[in-house]
Amino acid sequence: MKQARLFNCLYAAIFCLLWSPAIHAFHIVGGELTYECLGGSNYRLSLTVYRDCYSTGAPFDNPAYIFIFTASGTLLNTLSIAMPPGGPQRVNPPDNICLNTLPDVCVETLTYTTIVNLPPISGGYTLVYQRYSRNSTIVNIYNPDQTGSSYTTTIPPATLANCNNSPVFNSLPPIVICAGEPLYVDQSAFDVDGDSLVYELCAPLVGGSDACPQPGDLFNCNPAGDPAPSPPYNTVDFIPPYSGTNPLGGSPPVTINPQTGLLTGVPTTIGQFVVGICVTEYRNGLPINSIRRDFQFNVTNCQVVQAAVQSDNITPQGDYIITDCGQDFTVDFINTSLGASSYFWTFGDPTVTTDFSSLFNPSYTYPDTGQYVVTLVADSGIPGCIDTATIFVRIYPTLTNNFSYVAGCAYDPVVFTDLSTTTYGIINAWSWSFGDGSSTTEQNPAHTYADGGTKTVSLSTTTSLGCQLTIQQNIYVAPVPVANFTASPLCINTPVQFTDITSGAPPALWQWNFGDGGTSGSQSPIHTYTNAGTYTVTLTVTTAENCVDDWQNTFTIYPDFTANAGPDTEICAGDVVQLQANADFPWFIYQWSPPDGILSGANTASPQISPTSNITYTLTISDPNGCSRTDNLNVTVNPQPSVSITGNNIVCLGDNATLTANIGANITNFTWTGGGLNNSTDAVLTVAPTDTTAYILTVLDSNNCTNADTFTVIVQFPITANAGGSAEFCAGQSVQLTASGGISYQWSPPLGLSNAGIANPVASPLNTTQYTVTVSNNCFSDTASVLVIVNPLPVVNAGPDATINVGETITLSGSAQSSAGGLQYTWTPPDGLDDPALLTPVASPLATTVYYLSATDANGCAATDSLRLDVTNIFEVLLPNAFSPNKDGVNDGFGIVRSRGLKELLEFRVYNRWGQLIFETNDFTARWDGNFKGVPQELGVYVFYIKALTFLDNEYVQQGNITLIR
């Protein structure tokens, strides 16, 4: 963009780097290292260094040292490059920033170059430059004034890229960025080899140190001339949330377009930031080298102002071009300026003196065709902070676009005819878009659409004067049908259903030809073939818009066959029979229905059935072609004849039983079996079984169906009663008695029994008892007895409740007695007891406790009693208030007379009136004898201090006065 910057003259007077020269003792701002292949293994190396103008004691290197390493890290050579003539050059700030809003910032740059011969080697070369250190005011890394820089790049091996040229950045980095303003900075690079370039934000590398700020230098390194260490190198240590990929923060954060190298974002934090920009070159899909620009971005409060206008194109000189090819000579201007609060336009019309406007987006009507120079001045509102843009407006009326077309159905060519005209110049370019993704630059094209519908066709024409005009027109292409159909089943003498499944445009007419002379005009007709064979069927469909399609398909009509389910059959209820259909074609599919009563084989020719009532089965036989035939089979189910036996089913040994046959009216024959009987035909039987016996009555009715009933006569024998073995338990417990041998049971005495009338009652007598049970089976009875022994419980007394103070002891007075002897004792819980197995243990709990005394005798019977031992928390120390150390044996020492609740004396100190410590002990029994260092102390008042530990592990403190008298 060609702009008249009204403030360019202010640059030299205002800019020089970094916030203030007084606070910067370190100088590195950034740099990068690139190379150019000159042929014959010769390379021109270029080292660009950016420096803080205000740094002192750290000028540009003279010489600078570049180190050449192999891929394995071996140092091959150190290049010494003298400072180039002319010295460093200052870097101007971006030209869209108001200078009088900037702080005092100054950056200067210097590029060192040298030529070196580097023949191809395996792995290639790594080029390194190192310098120490960075500005201490950098805010996004730790310890910036203790962090140096490494600039590196790689010459790849010839096998990867022979005579490679590294990328070279197209423009300088910005030395100033305005906080809160949108950032658009071009950091793209150029690669003379045409390699693909990929851009990314990356972490800069560290290098150099306090001991050797310029590796390779003979005077400032220890040891002298110490080279840079071999790569790889560590990256700078970013302070969270900053990182190599988010070095500036902001919202949205600053990012770089990986394809274009355009930096965008809105930095919001003021300060100095280290930023790394890596450019990787790819050849044949493989990365071959990277360069890394390491630079310090300065974000500050400043004002951006930029005049700009939306235009048709921009010339290489930066001029805006607007071409108008309308009818009324009116141009609508679109303002795209940044940072301005007011605008002033002059439209370059020499015929009037009123061709100006202060609108944001003005319109202006020119008097005639021609070229006009328009000027836009964007004013930020800050004195002296404005920007100007120049626009060239070209008026070339009149261009008219139009076209005609001839359309029909889809798949038929649509012919387009251009009818456009112009009164200036000639139309020399056409661009058609057919609305289906296709386009052409022919003047009068023909285009075939693959589907119908409304299509939006656009025609753009361009004249020899650069005028462009586009017209759009909707055309209609009639959609076509896509004929298709299905047919089933394909069987002789069977109606075949033909189903229209045409897609696309809906048909209005159908015409069928069935291939046997038959035709139809229905949409989905039915047709029956009377002869087997192959037929070609054709369906022709026509839409209401006369678009036609047809579809042919060849079908085979298969010959006929027969289904035979077999003869009807008659069965008795409960019988299982097997049906048998014709099985002439084993590969056919059989299906019997309904499924009621079919036990197995429903998909075979011979299923097994057992229906419960009369039923008709349908057999469907299908061939592999989908043709099928059916046949029915009737099954009559006769009910089973009625039969039952009545009589007495329980008899005593030696008695008779009478059995009676109950049968239906249509019974033609019946017989008795079982118990020695064989084919007896009596309706009433008298039997005398000697053991339990089952008798069977079998009947036959007039349908030849049979049925049977079974009657069991139980014979009761004399019994022997059994009451089980004796039982023994402790008072309060129970035992289950178990009797056997009969049907009914009666126990006596009933006292202590859960139920005296059952075989297995629960016995809970208070005393030893002998129980007798009477057992019977309705014919015979017997008795038996069992002894239940009840052992008494021990008598236990835990003693009376008591109260003690924490830390004190008490002897518990438990007692226990048992006639069985062999008593064992246990106190619970055992906490605070010296021996919980004694009747009288010593107790010293730290908290109130309920103790339980349990006693178990030789019979295993146990009883329990309890007592409550309350524990008080009294903490005290008893001391005298005076003592007389005169060796008369009475009150000669000062000490603790008695204490309660304290388990350990931590400190016992005595001080004189001057605060001097004259006695100290941690022994409860120790006494102060009134002397200090062997010298008797004078009469008077002394201060004591006591600190002790309670049995609850709390501190106890007491202090007071003691009077010494003599």
Image (cartoon, helix red, strand yellow):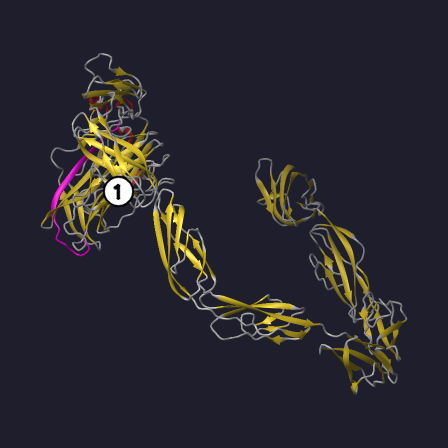
Q: In this view, does 456 lie to the left or right of 375?
A: right
Viewer-side residue, 879 vs 21: 21
The answer to whether one can see residue 768 in this image is yes
Say which residue label 1 marks.
Answer: 447
Is 110 contained in the magenta span? Answer: yes
Between 611 and 546, which is closer to the camera in this rendering? 546
Q: Residue furthest left?
A: 40
For residue 549, side relative to residue 318 (left or right): right
Residue pictured at 70% horizontal, 42% vertical: 880
Position of 752 with respect to 304 (left or right) is: right
User: Amino acid under label 1?
Assistant: His
Quadrant of the rendered structure where residue 619 is?
bottom right
Q: Residues within 10 Å of mark 1 (few under 14, many from 20)?
A: some
Residue 775 part of the magenta segment = no
Give the extent of the magenta segment.
104-125
**Residue 322 percent across, percent down from the top left:** 22, 26
